[in-house]
Image (cartoon, rainbow, N blue to C red):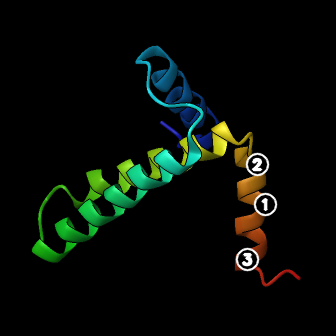
Amino acid sequence: SEFNTKQIQERIYRNKINKGFNTTDIPKEFCYLYAEVAEAFEAFRKGESNFGEELADIAIFLLGIAKIKKITTASISTTITCITSNCT
């Protein structure tokens, strides 16, 4: 199926709510994100097969932080488009 970041972001946030995970402490979320980046780097460095899963974990935390801060995927997409198109 098509990758729809808005739907994925909503699912990530609902999962956090349903499982009682953090939805308010942004510094804590950045600590978790940092840990996932370290795990991804370690998987990459060792050539482990779970590298893609670790990258997915990073995306989950990034989209989760954005949702907590009420940053839409449309806004993220616009920024990415601008950066890759050399907008000023």
- The percent position of residue 22, horizontal first and vertical second, equals 49, 31
Q: Is residue 67 above or below residue 10?
A: below
Is 50 displayed left or right of 65 in the figure?
left
For mark 1, what is the residue? Answer: 78
Q: Which of marks 3 and 2 is nearer the N terminus?
A: 2
- Residue at image coords 70%, 42%: 69
- Determine which quarter of the picture holds residue 51: bottom left
Q: In this view, does 75 lie above or below 41?
A: above
| Residue at mark 1 to residue at mark 3: CA–CA distance | 9 Å
For mark 3, what is the residue? Answer: 83
Q: Which amino acid does label 2 sit on?
A: Ala
- Badges 1 and 2: C-beta atoms under 8 Å apart? yes
For numbered disc 2, what is the local secondary structure?
A: helix
- Residue at image coords 53%, 43%: 3
Is 72 or 25 nearer to us in this picture? 25
- Badges 3 and 2: C-beta atoms under 8 Å apart? no
- Residue at image coords 42%, 54%: 31
